[in-house]
């Protein structure tokens, strides 16, 4: 029998316990499929006394994850602690320095330090793998890095934060405002301790930056992601979008154009009938577009014990089977510094604004749009039953317009003196 | 620079030319991602004089694919000729015997001879890979074998023949009968020369048998697939199903139960709102269910030059990168002989029948169902405007029933003497 692959597991939260369960219940299956036993030798977590839903008595215990990462009886260091600095970073660096391969579920760490870690790993001849860091149980990094490896990638899109999609779906289905559903989600434990990581788009932005690096062969650059959370999405816009055949999603989009690499994680309208538009609740979806393959859509659970542990263990299985790929699919030294481009690609836009009941009000708005080079595809005036005034809510769907032109027009609306409140513009991503 | 990976390409039809184009246009990308050049050295096809949409002048030509497979300047033999016997089989065997790795798009060959070929390849220390054989451009074999490698697979489902889904979708959207849409599809070139390979479910059954072998660690057993094509699907049933919230799909299902391995490729009802129900036209979809990950859905183009060549080249890239997995994900010698079980898993059923306008007719049918242990969830009587008689079309949706019980009840309906024509029963797959 070949030597077992020995895992050191840092982090015994939901995901860590999921990993323990797979290793314990599927020992035969893992050995059959990889040709060698896969075992846990040592674990680490802050609190040893905590009651956990797994038998850990057979494993050595390290309070310090750095010590775990350096143990002689560990071949693969699994980091499921989280946090983009501190112990997770120190332990990952220690593991590489000690000659261990690393499997990580830590999107924040990789989004912030991925390039340096990849370079260190490759210099040491070790691997960093992170399937679990993006879209939970969906094998999207494998699909992109390997399944579509012969394609030039044109665009990567995704709904990659289940909590945000849960909130937006529930706002839509129940007609509830953001604040109410946000509070529900918080009480149900669907949100991070700092909820802005979810609803501010940061968590999903981390994931997008990792996919973009793989897709376009560029250095991961989370700071260049255009981030806009869902806190400003109004139930009115969800309703109007629905009536016009759209859903609002927190959608990540990465694409390379002549102007550089665009990375956006922002609320967008997508057609109701598209796979992205049909995605309900906490499920994740990633859309990969390649020049040969066309469009591939992957859908599955984006979080949770089983799905995330499944992804962690898929990376472990690959290591056990001898697959050795660079962190981002090509050597770290060959990853390019992409010029960040902010929303260079034109798209149709949805716009909502409230016009004063004055002669010529609409003409003034239309003039702003025209002067910005934006033409109107659809316009609707919404009758508000029971409204106390005659002010009109007006919706536009524009033809494709450059984001800068939309920003320009939006900036000029105020000077017309015919608007009440702030106008809204939301990109309609063509999927 | 490391030595190039040298490809011998047998078959210069649509897929073969797609492979040539990728190798020629993406040489830098392939080398960057694998660390070595990937080149074609020799090609083979029946007719050298045929005008093809690619420059083949730099490649050696072999009229005999066996000779191609044995060339010293070929490392990987790519078989995109098709046919489950004859030259494709001989050349694949010759390639393995000559110490070449094999990349195949040939589902028929693998469905019929996969076990023997896998054993031969493993004995010779060579690989057979076949991502392109199942669901075209969707990296489903990779997702199943690698991405979900730490899961016990519970069920695999899929719409894996785009032509059948095109026909069923168009029947539904246009209200056209099968024969008309079949003829359209034939004239558009959407069907194989022997259309029964498509509409009889054989092509999709081949694919299902390959996925089942990987999913359940069993020897591929195409002969045990319960096959039923779409030729008997009526526009009436499509309409009735639609009204009750379902679509009819040619759905492949493989699952392991206590009674053995079930493999079905049959028309089924699926909920309209499910991803499978929403799948339109020629697109493919595969649903993978694992014990840890839950449900993963993959959607993409199931055929065509670019998508299929993308899948062929993904296998080539894996070989170039040094990934070496057994043909069906675990050593051929460890694949089990599964007991074939025919439709052991209970499901709800849709039934349609025309009852004579006689007192007690419905009671007799209900009695047959009751005696077979089948209970009724919904019943509808369809009014047929303008019908010349008072005979009633009756639809049932049953609660979950064992397929054998359904067959038993269907067999007894005739003896009641109250039916006109044959009753129809279609499984409702729970997705």
Image: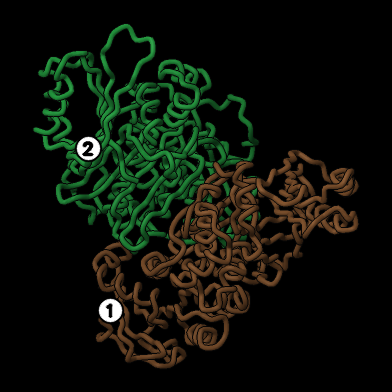
Chain colours: A green, B brown
Residue at (47, 43) in percent of width and height: A78
Q: What's the distance in space between the residues labelled 1 and 2, CA to CA?
A: 40 Å
Do callouts 1 and 2 point to residues on the same chain? Answer: no
Task: Tell which tag, 1 or 2, sits nearer the viewer.
Answer: 1
Front residue of this view, candidates A188 and A239:
A239
Q: Which residue is mark 1?
A: B54
Q: Which residue is mark 2?
A: A224
Front residue of this view, candidates B283 and A397:
A397
In the rendered view, tell whether residue B303 sits above or below residue A296.
below
Q: Secondary structure at mark 1?
A: loop
Front residue of this view, candidates A402 and B194:
B194
Rendered image quadrant of residue A270: top left
Please indicate whether residue B315 sits to the left or right of residue A267 in the image: right
Give percent across and percent down for residue B161.
Answer: 53, 64
Q: Secondary structure at mark 2?
A: helix
Please indicate whether residue A416 sits to the left or right of residue A230 in the image: left
State which chain disc 2 sits on: A
In the rendered view, tell whether residue A12 sits above or below residue B120.
above
Give percent across and percent down for residue A315.
Answer: 47, 51
Does the image show residue B184?
Answer: yes
**Location of the N terminus of chain B (image quadrant):** bottom left
State which chain disc 1 sits on: B
Give percent across and percent down for residue B176.
Answer: 54, 58
Please indicate whether residue B98 sits to the left or right of residue A126 in the image: right
Give percent across and percent down for residue A284.
Answer: 46, 40
């Amino acid at each position: 029998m070949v030597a077992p692959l020995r895992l050191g597991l840092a982090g015994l939260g939901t995901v860590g316990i999921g990993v323990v369960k797979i290793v314990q219940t599927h020992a035969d299956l893992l050995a059959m499929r990889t040709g060698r036993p896969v075992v846990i030798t040592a674990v680490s977590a802050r609190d040893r006394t905590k009651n956990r839903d797994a038998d850990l008595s057979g494993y050595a215990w390290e309070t310090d994850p750095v010590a775990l990462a350096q143990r002689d009886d560990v071949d693969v260091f699994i980091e499921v602690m989280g946090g983009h600095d501190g112990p997770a970073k120190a332990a990952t660096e220690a593991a590489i320095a000690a000659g261990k391969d690393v499997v990580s579920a830590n999107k924040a760490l990789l989004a912030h330090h991925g390039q340096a870690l990849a370079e260190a790993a490759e210099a040491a001849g070790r691997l960093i793998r992170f399937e679990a860091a993006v879209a939970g149980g969906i094998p999207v990094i494998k699909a992109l890095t390997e399944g579509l490896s012969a394609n030039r990638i044109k665009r990567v899109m995704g709904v990659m934060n289940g909590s945000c999609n849960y909130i937006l779906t529930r706002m839509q289905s129940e007609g509830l405002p953001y604040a109410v559903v946000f509070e529900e989600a918080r009480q149900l434990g669907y949100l991070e301790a700092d909820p802005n990581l979810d609803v501010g788009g940061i968590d999903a932005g981390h994931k997008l930056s990792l996919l973009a690096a793989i897709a376009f062969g560029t250095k991961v650059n989370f700071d260049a992601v255009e981030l806009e959370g869902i806190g400003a999405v109004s139930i009115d816009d969800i309703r109007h979008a629905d009536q016009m055949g759209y859903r609002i999603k927190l959608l990540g989009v990465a694409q390379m154009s002549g102007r550089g690499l665009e990375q956006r994680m922002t609320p967008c309208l997508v057609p109701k009938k598209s796979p992205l538009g049909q995605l309900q609740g906490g499920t994740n979806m990633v859309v990969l577009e390649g020049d040969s393959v066309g469009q591939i859509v992957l859908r599955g659970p984006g979080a949770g014990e089983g799905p995330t542990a499944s992804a962690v263990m898929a990376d472990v299985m690959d290591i056990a089977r001898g697959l050795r790929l660079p962190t981002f699919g090509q050597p770290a030294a060959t990853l390019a510094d992409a010029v960040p481009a902010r929303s260079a690609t034109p798209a149709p836009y949805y716009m909502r604004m409230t016009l004063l009941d004055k002669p010529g009000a609409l003409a003034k708005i239309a003039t702003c749009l025209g002067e910005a080079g934006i033409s109107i595809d659809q316009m609707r005036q919404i009758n508000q039953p029971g409204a106390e005034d005659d002010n009109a809510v007006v919706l536009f769907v524009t033809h494709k317009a450059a984001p800068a032109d939309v920003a320009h027009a939006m900036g000029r609306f105020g000077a017309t003196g015919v608007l009440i409140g702030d106008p809204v513009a939301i990109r309609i991503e063509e999927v």
